[in-house]
Image: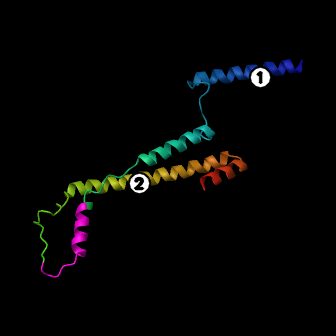
Amino acid sequence: MTSLRLHEVLSIGVKNATGKRAHDGAPVAAITDESDPFFILAMKQALDNALVKLVDPPNPSAAWEEQLFRRANQFDSGMMMYSEDDPDSVPRPDPDVVAAYDETIKVNAARRKRLNARLAMVEANLMKAMSSTLQDTYTSMLE
């Protein structure tokens, strides 16, 4: 008799739980907890992908700076004069382009810092979700 009552209570509880989830609009198999290991793994993968895709643009003044460095360090016996009008000279980059490049670099650096901080937090949560033997296996894999 007790097992029938227990079975009845459990079945009613399961029906109510699925009904509440459906009522909330979330599917029955939805992940609803931020500490769920599947969510943590998905978040870690998304952060890794975002960091890989975050690439800085090429420096527009790199050729100009290289030319200046080469000219400054080239042996000159005093017989040869360098001129800005030299046809082989690399033109100076546009200041607006350099300013836009500097702004992009600052934005990317700030975003990279935020993503790395979030990734460290997610990895710490992942380590908390693992058992001690899995933690040891995970850390030995990364070495």
Q: Nearer the viewer, residue 90 or 80?
A: 80
Instruction: Give the SS element for disc 1.
Output: helix
Quadrant for residue 11, please give it: top right
Q: Is residue 106 above or below residue 36?
A: below
* Magenta highlight: main SS: helix
Instruction: Give the SS element for disc 2.
Output: helix
Q: Which residue is mark 1?
A: 10
List x then y, in percent, for residue 39. 58, 38
92 within the magenta span: no
Q: Is residue 11 above or below residue 31?
A: above
Residue type at mark 1: give it.
Leu
Q: Left or right: where does residue 65 sit relative to residue 133?
A: left
Q: Left or right: where does residue 60 sit relative to residue 3?
A: left
Segment tinted magenta in the rendering: 63-79
Q: Calculate the distance from the C-alpha at mark 2 to the C-alpha at mark 1.
A: 51 Å
The residue sitting at 57% across, 26% down in the picture is 26
List x then y, in percent, for residue 83. 12, 70
Quadrant for residue 81, please give it: bottom left
Q: Which residue is mark 2?
A: 110
The residue sitting at 12% across, 80% down in the picture is 79
Residue type at mark 2: give it.
Ala
Q: Left or right: where does residue 122 sit relative to residue 103?
A: right
